[in-house]
Image (spheres, helix red, strand yellow):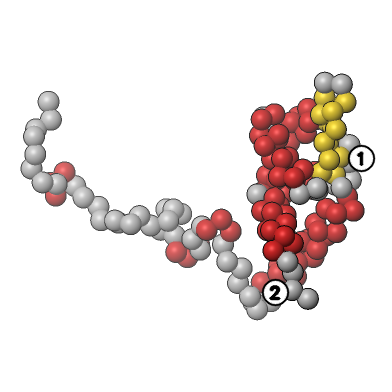
């Protein structure tokens, strides 16, 4: 059965919502908690209120969390029946990948587009595009400094 365009869009949005490391951290923090206020999340995660609000929005749009206003506070409740199985699946996949890496059967590509460790310069930083070191003597003559 071929998924329709709407289902594909929803799936992409779901994966985008979980792709952000801080958003994944927030989702994992919510699992097992019956309900947390946004203020509690700010304190427990050590993030500014605006960051927590921005991180929650895609999770809410995908239906993974529900936000309810109680007085002046915003209470966040995770849809555990949706998010729990996904996080369990991701955890199982990570364990399987780690086992394959330990056995030398697969090499996981670096996360976040960062270069592999062996492609790094001795300083631990990626090599610069122009790795030539230029001294003052190598630079073209110009105006003298005041």
Residue positioned 87% across, 47% down in the render? 79
Residue 127: x and y, percent? Answer: 38, 57
From the viewer's side, name the closer residue of 46 and 27: 27
Disc number for residue 100? 2
106 vs 131: above or below: below
- Marks 1,2: beta carbons within 8 A: no
Q: Position of residue 69 (x, y in %)?
A: 84, 28
Mark 1–mark 2 Cα distance, whole angstroms, equals 36 Å
- The residue lying at 88 percent from left, 50 percent from top is 80
Query: Alpha-carbon neighbours of circle 1 within 10 Å: few (<14), some, or many (≥20)?
Result: few
User: Pointer 1: what residue?
Assistant: 34
Q: Nearer the viewer, residue 98 or 45?
A: 45
Q: Residue at x 69, y 50 (%)?
A: 17
Task: Work out which quarter of the rendered image holds the C terminus and state it.
Answer: top left
Please determine whether, in this image, residue 105 is positioned above or below residue 45: below
Q: Which quadrant of the structure image shows residue 103?
A: bottom right
Q: Nearer the viewer, residue 121 or 55?
A: 55
Report if residue 123 is visible in the image: yes
């Amino acid at each position: 059965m071929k998924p329709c365009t709407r289902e594909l869009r929803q799936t992409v949005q779901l994966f985008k919502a979980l792709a952000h490391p801080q958003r994944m951290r927030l989702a994992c923090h919510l699992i097992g908690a019956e309900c947390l206020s946004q203020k509690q999340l700010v304190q427990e995660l050590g993030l500014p209120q605006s960051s927590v609000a921005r991180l929650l929005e895609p999770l809410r749009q995908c239906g993974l969390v529900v936000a309810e206003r109680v007085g002046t506070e915003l209470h966040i409740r995770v849809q555990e029946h949706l998010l729990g199985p996904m996080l369990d699946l991701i955890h199982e996949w990570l364990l399987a990948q780690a086992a394959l890496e330990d056995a030398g059967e697969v090499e996981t590509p670096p996360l976040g587009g960062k270069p592999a460790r062996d492609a790094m310069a001795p300083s631990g930083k990626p090599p610069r595009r122009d790795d030539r070191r230029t001294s003052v003597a190598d630079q073209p003559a110009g105006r003298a400094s005041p």
